[in-house]
């Protein structure tokens, strides 16, 4: 069985399942032998936290979740995974093409743009550059309700498969279609996620036993000693005291990961593997940018009195 959270685009999640081959069987209509395959449906499992709790509780249930990028995880998902049952781990990832379209009843629209949570997440930067005025609605909002909210002068950002009959794409809609692919992952309950010969991207959460000056440096020293080069590092306050750190890195083998975890345990560093995503290159890569550093300034010399 496969599910998704209520905030996720069903069309994009289904595309991820099809592209990655995560579906165990091909459903068919009840019309008898030779019937055409029915459209894959994913269970709506509620909020992200509820989705993770349900996957941990029901044997054989897996869920499709938006991951941000394998090398640069979405922070909300990192936190949700660490707060969920320890048996849960992301075991696969795939990128799918954007299916978002900007449409209206006529070629000219003057009102606001009705968009749901998933659409806003994926399209907000493009919408802002086009000067659109988003009207955010829950992802579960029906198409009829969205059309009513938009009104005769409004527009929708919606998956192409759900565009209302007679509606047309607006100028700029192609920028949503040509946007970067969207990454999804598969979360399941598993005792241990192994790393195949091709290597994997690992998400690791860890927390030093003491939150003091140099505690993070000690953990980073362990990572460097075993040959780990971090792609991602983020900290977050913890109600248990010390900060929680989230890291992402490429790992060549299960044994290397086991060695790292053993060394962290020896250093009294709590840890948990959140994801083991097969692969070493994840294209497209996270967006790069050109930093602008402070110009080097000489330190003024001081003289004694």
Image: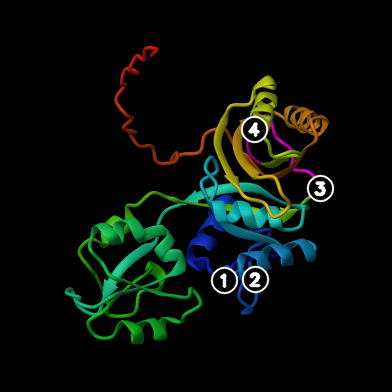
Q: Nearer the viewer, residue 249 or 208?
A: 208
Q: Residue at x 73, y 27 (%)?
A: 256
**Quarter residue 305 falls in:** top left
Helix, strand or loop at mark 3: loop
Q: Are marks 1 and 4 in contact (CB under 8 Å)?
A: no
Which is closer to the viewer, label 1 or label 4? Answer: 4
User: Quick check: is 197 in the magenta stretch?
Assistant: yes
Q: Earlier in the sequence, mark 4 or mark 3?
A: 3
Q: CA distance from mark 1 to mark 4?
A: 41 Å
Q: Earlier in the sequence, mark 1 or mark 2?
A: 1
Q: Are marks 1 and 2 in contact (CB under 8 Å)?
A: yes
Q: Which residue is mark 1?
A: 6
Q: Which residue is mark 2?
A: 45
Image position, residue 38 (x, y; %): 57, 71
Which residues make up the magenta segment?
A: 192-204
Q: Earlier in the sequence, mark 1 or mark 4?
A: 1
Q: Is residue 157 above or below residue 96?
A: below
Q: Earlier in the sequence, mark 1 or mark 3?
A: 1
Q: Earlier in the sequence, mark 3 or mark 2?
A: 2
The rendered magenta stretch, by its main secondary structure, is classed as loop
Q: Is residue 165 left or right of residue 245?
A: left
Q: Residue at x 70, y 22 (%)?
A: 226
Q: Residue furthest left?
A: 108
Q: Nearer the viewer, residue 50 or 28?
A: 50
Q: Nearer the viewer, residue 196 or 25?
A: 196
Q: Which residue is mark 3?
A: 191
Q: Which residue is mark 4?
A: 213
Q: CA distance from mark 2 to mark 4?
A: 42 Å
**Quarter residue 40 falls in:** bottom right
Q: Is residue 4 above or below residue 238?
A: below
Helix, strand or loop at mark 4: loop
Image position, residue 240 (x, y; %): 73, 52
């Amino acid at each position: 069985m496969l599910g998704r959270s209520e905030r996720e685009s069903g069309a994009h999640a289904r595309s991820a399942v099809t592209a990655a081959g995560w579906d165990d069987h091909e459903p068919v209509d009840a019309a008898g032998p030779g019937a055409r395959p029915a459209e894959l449906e994913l269970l709506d499992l509620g909020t992200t936290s509820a989705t993770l709790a349900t996957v941990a509780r029901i044997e054989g249930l897996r869920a499709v979740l938006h991951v941000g990028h394998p090398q640069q995880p979405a922070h909300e998902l990192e936190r949700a995974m660490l707060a969920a049952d320890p048996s849960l781990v992301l075991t696969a990832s795939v990128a799918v093409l954007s299916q978002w379209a900007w449409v209206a009843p006529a070629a000219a629209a003057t009102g606001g743009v009705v968009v749901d949570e998933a659409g806003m997440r994926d399209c907000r930067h493009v919408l802002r550059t086009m000067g659109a005025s988003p009207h955010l609605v829950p992802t579960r909002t029906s198409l009829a309700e969205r059309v009513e909210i938009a009104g005769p002068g409004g527009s929708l950002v919606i998956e192409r498969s759900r565009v209302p009959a007679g509606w047309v794409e607006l100028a700029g809609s192609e920028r949503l279609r040509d946007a970067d692919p969207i990454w999804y992952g598969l979360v399941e309950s598993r005792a241990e996620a192994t790393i195949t010969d091709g290597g994997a991207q690992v998400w690791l959460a860890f927390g030093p036993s003491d939150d003091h000056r140099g505690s993070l440096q000690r953990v980073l020293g362990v990572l460097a000693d075993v040959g780990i080069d971090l792609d991602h590092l983020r900290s977050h306050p913890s109600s248990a005291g010390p900060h929680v750190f989230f890291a992402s890195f490429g790992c060549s083998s299960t044994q290397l990961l086991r060695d790292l975890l053993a060394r962290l345990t020896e250093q009294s560093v709590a840890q948990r593997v959140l994801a083991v995503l097969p692969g070493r290159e994840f294209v497209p890569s996270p967006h790069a940018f050109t930093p602008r550093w402070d110009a080097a300034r000489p330190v003024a010399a001081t003289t004694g009195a």
